[in-house]
Amino acid sequence: MSLRLRDPGRNNGVAPEFTVDPKLLDAVSPSGDRGGIVVGSGLNGEPLTISALRAMPTRIVLVGGLYLARQVALRAMAVGAWVVIATGRPAAWQVLPQAAGTGPNGRPSPLAQIRRLSPVELPRPSEDAPLLVVTDGGPTPQDLFPPRSPWQTTVYVLPYLHPQATTIANAADIVLMQRLPVGQAELAARIWRLPPQMMRQLTTLKDDQVVALGANLWRPLRLVTTAKEQQLLGPVRRGD
């Protein structure tokens, strides 16, 4: 099973349409395929989208800083997903509830929920309300919320690659990697059996560049950001 990186200029089929407040969509996300998340642009500036919210359990691994992880979570929320963040650093994720705002009753919107790194009951995902669970548990996270049902996607945020995270890394449908130091790139090459040229490319990525890796997929791309995202997250960067 693999995730496709989708070019909106091509006929990739029709993904489901999710209902979300248009103001939220305009505020935090550039437009993209229905049901997809825009992760960056290609060499010609075309938006590239991953079908991260779909009718099957999905795993995504992010290797890099919090900036990338929070941007992916914001964009999932903008296309109608519930987002649950399990983290040991809740202050770093307050931008999600801030972006979600409040409901008609004046209480915080339930679209974004921050939880501890311990098992909790999750919202039940559906086609109309997909679920993105972010596990921000360090380089060797526990698999607390493996995706078990359609319309649930679990994102594992790895600040760096660790040999003990090999099982989680290998189980991913897609991996988004930012620049790695040489030792980390060598480990990535062993985990995913990358040739030397790809391994070297991982060490030379710019701060705004990411490689999307999956089955039969190696796609360098450039992160793009909206004005509202810059207000929430600051400029595009490699670190947190």
Image (spheres, rainbow, N blue to C red):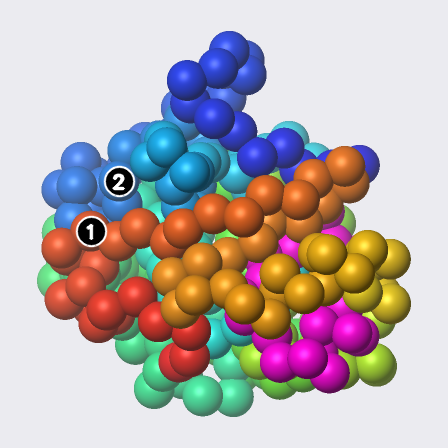
Residue drawn where x is 35% and y is 71% of the image: 237
Image coordinates for residue 121, horizontal then vertical, percent: 60, 65
Residue drawn where x is 73% and y is 56% of the image: 197
Q: Is residue 68 magenta?
A: no
Q: Is residue 214 visible?
A: yes
Q: Nearer the viewer, residue 51 or 135?
A: 51
Left or right: 207, with 30 as reference point: right
Image coordinates for residue 105, horizontal then vertical, percent: 14, 57
Q: Are circles 2 and 1 on residues that touch, CB within 8 Å?
A: yes
Neighbours of disc 2 within 10 Å: few (<14), some (14-19), many (20+): some
Q: CA distance from mark 2 to mark 1?
A: 7 Å
Rendering quarter of residue 33: top left
Residue 13 image label? none
Q: Is label 1 in a helix, a strand or a loop?
A: loop
Residue drawn where x is 14% and y is 66% of the image: 231
Image coordinates for residue 57, horizontal then vertical, percent: 70, 43
Q: Which residue is mark 2?
A: 30
Per the rendered image, the range of residues in magenta is 170-188
Q: Is residue 213 depicted above or below 208 in this figure?
A: above
Left or right: 115, with 41 as reference point: right
Q: Is residue 83 visible?
A: no
Q: Which residue is mark 1?
A: 226
Q: Nearer the viewer, residue 110 or 117?
A: 117
**Which amino acid is tagged 2?**
Pro
Q: Is label 2 in a helix, a strand or a loop?
A: loop
Q: Is residue 164 depicted above or below 128 in this figure?
A: below
